[in-house]
Amino acid sequence: MTEPATTKMGTHRHADPPRVGSEGAEARRLIAELGPGFNARTVRVLTEGDLVAVHGVHDDGGHARAGFDVFRIDRGRLAEHWAAHQAVVATTASGNSQTDGPADVTRPQQGARNGRLVDYLIDTILIGRKHDRLKHFFVADLIQHDPLVGNGVKALTAAWRTPGTGYERRHTTIADGEFVLTVSTGTVRHAPRVFYDLFRVDRGMVVEHWNVTTERGGLPSSTPVAITAPESQGS
């Protein structure tokens, strides 16, 4: 599980910028215009309700950071912004980069179902520390983008079983088609952390995982609702 690699992560600010729409294209434009010397490469954009999540790479002068920007739109204006980024590394345990993989939402009608699946995964399996059941939610050959974790569900299970490491609360979920982003809090080796996890779901199983782990900072104000076990997974 990736530990914080740089400062300026897990930031949160209330904002009153120019009026923007709720479409992902507007979030792309906003990031691209953050300031002189700032370059951004947007890889994925997810939208659900009043939230827009952008996954990509920022470069503010030779310091590339991969991660997530989450925006909340209120009556056509950007009301809040959360960000979590970590340094881009040259070599990862899996051989995959921190952002590569499928980028486009191709099954928008599956967002609600996939969101419920991932909510149950976080709320019941991870928070409940039922790690022996992870194999029922992740394919065996899971594609992993955490720089410190190898491919496969066994490697991810071992990381989540690290002493003093665990999820305690899910704060928000953004589900758009086959992609689901969750923001949760917990600990890594007993130190408080915020977890941004992006899952790609295919036919009821997680097939790919990207993430950023930061020191605790601002969190989205949305709160989760109680859910029941997805029918495909049972109890």
Image (tube, rainbow, N blue to C red):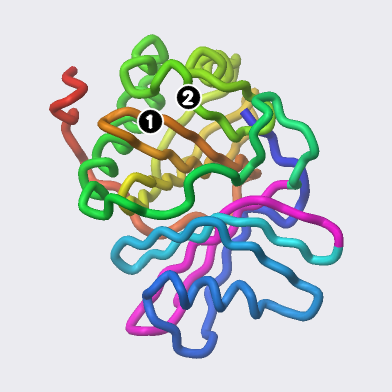
- Pointer 1 with pointer 2, Cβ within 8 A: yes
Going by the numbered disc 2, the residue's amino acid type is Leu
| Segment tinted magenta in the rendering | 62-86
Q: Earlier in the sequence, mark 1 or mark 2?
A: 2
Extreme-bottom residue of the structure: 18
The verdict on residue 106 being magenta is no
Q: Looking at the picture, how far across and down is residue 20, in whole percent?
A: 44, 84
Secondary structure of the residue carrying tag 1 is strand
- Residue denoted by label 1: 206
Rendered image quadrant of residue 41:
bottom right
Q: Main secondary structure of the magenta part?
A: strand
What is the crowding at mark 2: few (fewer than 14 residues within 10 Å), some, or many (at least 20)?
A: some
Report the number of discs: 2
Q: Quadrant of the N terminus?
A: top right
Residue nearest the observer in this picture, 219 or 28? 28
Q: Looking at the picture, how far across and down is residue 63, in whole percent?
A: 82, 56
